[in-house]
Image: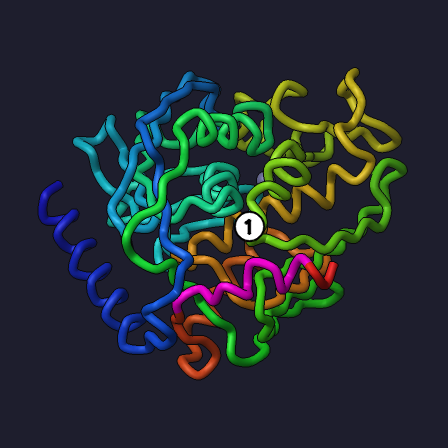
Amino acid sequence: MRHKRCSYVSRSNEETRRRASKLKGSSLSLIRQTTLAHTVGTSGLGLHTGVPVEVRLRPAPPDNGYIFVRTDLDNFELPATVECVAHSSYATTLMHTGVTLATVEHLLAALRGGGVDNAYIEVDNLEVPIMDGSAEPFTELIERAGVVEQTAARRALRVRKKIVAAEGARRMSVEPFEGYEIDCLIDFAHPLIGVQRLRFDALDPIGFNREIASARTFGFTNEIEALRRANLIRGGSIDNAIVLTPDGMLNETPLRTHDEFVRHKILDIIGDLALLGMPLLGRVRAERSGHLFHAMLMTKLLRDDSAWEVVDMPIGALTTAGSSL
Ligand SMILES: [Zn+2]
């Protein structure tokens, strides 16, 4: 295990150096990195295994980002980075030297959306618990821990030119913008969904906790049957997803908001894009996107050195996006 951790450290340092060499901006920035004030924990069922999983969030030093720790595997560390994305068809899975961790995106959304920059996330199984299918239980956990400022300035990955990933009617792009805005459109031929569109200021933690965190994941009964046959989502139920039938839903309680579906897509985008290691300064436009598209866009962006730079988070960014909504 030890040499595997070391190999991650060297890769991580290399990445940090690569990004630091592009570091620009004022060291006098008043926006600082944050972490948790205390260690907190909870437990829930794994979506795929259906077994209980313990999760603990611990404070971490500046520039650490998010690192998952498999406590069942000698504290093996999986950094939450784009380079570690393994597969991402219906949930985002990380893999590092053969060790995997599934369903990371809702917890990452709670951290990124909640304005927490650095944390260790201990998990004692191969997936993060699904909880109620939203990020709200993790948001409440973060609120219970408290968030504290650190000495280092918060960094941001500033987009310098437009990058597009497209395939048929599915499309996702990121472009320069002095805030972090997500403009999301979904389109499902289903009576409860149809076309839903929402723009959101992803640098507003209060807005995230109030408008996005509680939106649950959703699935269609025919897809769910296929996943069940593949021996996946053994823990999936109406307790942790909106389960859609051809003309309605299995859940007996109402939707949390009429546009819960597009809100959840924004939640997924914030969670997946947290794998960039720092908040984005840019405008994201997503039309009919999904986890695969989110990974494709991030990879395409990071591969083009002229498309981004690392800067200290400008003070104005915290209000720019909000004022345009
Ligand atoms: Zn999701």
Residue 320 magenta: yes
Q: Which residue is mark 1?
A: 270
Q: Amino acid at mark 1?
A: Ile
Report the quarter where the N terminus lies. top left
x, y (%) of residue 207? 64, 43
Q: Is residue 215 left or right of residue 180?
A: right
Give the residue displayed 58% in from the left and 49% down from the top: 204
Q: Is residue 99 left or right of residue 101?
A: left
x, y (%) of residue 293? 58, 59
Identify whether 153 is placed above or below 57: below
Residue 101 magenta: no
Q: Nearer the viewer, residue 3 or 159?
A: 159
Give the residue displayed 21% in from the left and 67% down from the top: 14
Magenta-drawn segment: 312-322
Query: Which picture quadrant has residue 18?
Result: bottom left
x, y (%) of residue 6? 12, 52
- Determine if residue 186 is in view: yes
Identify whether 292 is placed above or below 133: below
Q: Secondary structure at mark 1?
A: helix
Q: Nearer the viewer, residue 176 or 264?
A: 176
Q: Is residue 187 left or right of residue 234?
A: right
- Determine if residue 47 is in view: no
Q: Nearer the viewer, residue 52 or 275?
A: 275
Q: Residue furthest left?
A: 2
Query: Which picture quadrant has residue 323?
Result: bottom right
Ligand 1 positioned in quadrant: top right
x, y (%) of residue 95? 34, 47
Give the residue displayed 41% in from the left and 20% down from the top: 42
Query: Which picture quadrant has residue 283?
Result: bottom right
